[in-house]
Image (cartoon, rainbow, N blue to C red):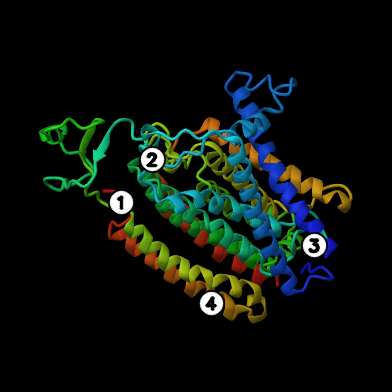
Amino acid sequence: MLEIALRLGGVLAAFLVLPLLVGQTEHKLMAHMQGRLGPMHAGRFHGWAQLIADGVKFAQKEDLVPEGADKPVFKLAPAVALLPYLLALLFIPLGPGDLVGSALDMGLFAVLALVGVGVLAVLMAGWASANKYTLIGALRAAAQLMAYELPFVLAAASVAIAAGTLSLGGIVEAWNPWWLLWQAPAAFVFFAAGLAEIRRPPFDAPIADSELVFGYLTEYAGLRFALLLLAEYAGIVVISALTTVLFLGGWKGPGPESLGWLWTLLKTGGLAMVVIWLRVAWPRLRVDQIQTLCWKGLVPVALGQLVLTTVVALAID
Amino acid sequence: MVVTMDSTLLGDYAAFAVLLAAGFAFVGAAMTANRLLRPSAPSRTKGEPYECGVETEPGQEAPKAPGSGAQAGSGATRTGVAPPPRSLVGADWAQVQIRYYVYAFLFVLFAVEAVFLFPWAAVFAGFGVAAAVEMGLFVTVLALGLAYAWRRGVLKWQ
């Protein structure tokens, strides 16, 4: 009982701390990539407390719900956007042995299902807002998320075939460095499709602030908006951590295995920085380009990887 | 397989349920704190949709259904006796071409099949070459479906 409570406490702590770290890193990294300083005042030292200050500000803001909105759905959408990422963190192993919230045998399947809930939250938010910009944003997101779900799942299946198990811990156990080469196409497909799943640039057409005001987030204000933003950063953590665990060997790395958790965190952090970097460096893809990249690029690559993985896995056997 | 000593299947799902409840408690607590701290000064303007001043007139059908989401001319709303309280532009009924539905069909076809990959992935090693042939058939069917859609021009944005 106590042990389960400790595990859940750890997952909750990771959920509350890691997205904020990613957010603060985004502030500073983007600023430096663009030749400016970013937040400098909150907390005195290089603006480290900026996001805490933002949180305090959001908590005091008026709760605005549009007159024409479908109010219960509108109010529920931020929770539906946020909670799947919290639950996904439960299954992602931090280190070897039992350094994991819950070592479910079908952890991979559960995590993919949870990440897929995102489309529901976006449709709820966009439709319930009763605003044409949110509706267009939500429909764009629905089309994008459904399309990218497919290469996302296929690339993950490739790893499951290579490891012969659906347990995330088991996949890391089975991993060895030459997977970096063998599974490289799947890794690329998975990471790109993951970016599209969390609607980060260059796949941010559903938000597209220069065309759609702020897409499906347009009508949100105050704390509900903050929760939706938190969901975005939690999404970055989950996608980076999943890519780490599936393709980069999770806790494996030089040094004693007792420091494995450090490797998981470092790799996850590195990937999160790539996510931030892409936002600074890449222009937004057009809606049709998004669909083209998925159906004519990522899906065929993922199918080819499936064949390759099966053949090689059997040959090794 | 990493299975902790004390984690039974039921225990795994119990942890999941507790975490789900904790998540809702977190959101609930945040919203409660918000309720205690925030001001409340509702007004008509705040309740309006944020549509950059191009709001549509509710309950009005467009005179003719346009092929795209283009607004009807703003002159249509000027016929009323009393001027509208805010600038309403066009009717709130418009037909837009939903270009995404084909992708939705494609997705359903593919995703339903992709789900079956996962149980297969966990056991295929025991079946050897037969499993590989199955895999080849499976991917061929999917690839043929995609090639067919591609050939028919479904994947081209119109």
Q: Are marks 2 and 1 in contact (CB under 8 Å)?
A: no
Q: Amino acid at mark 3?
A: Ile
- Asked whether residue A258 appears in the rendered view, the answer is yes
Report the Cα–Cα distance between label 1 and label 3: 51 Å
Q: Chain letter for mark 1, please.
A: B
Q: Are the numbered discs 2 and 1 placed on the same chain, yes or no?
A: no
Amino acid type of disc 2?
Arg
Query: Which numbered disc flags the more N-terminal residue, 3 or 2?
Result: 3
Which residue in the structure is indicated by mark 4? Answer: B133
Q: Is the residue at mark 4 from the same chain as the one at mark 2? A: no
Tell whether label 1 touches label 4 (CB within 8 Å): no
Tell me if label 4 and label 2 are in contact, CB under 8 Å: no
What secondary structure is found at the residue carrying circle 2? loop
Please indicate whether residue A45 sits to the left or right of residue A304 in the image.
right
Q: Nearer the viewer, residue A199 or A12?
A: A12
Residue A4: give its label.
Answer: 3
The relative height of residue B120 versus residue B153 in the rendered view (above or below) is below
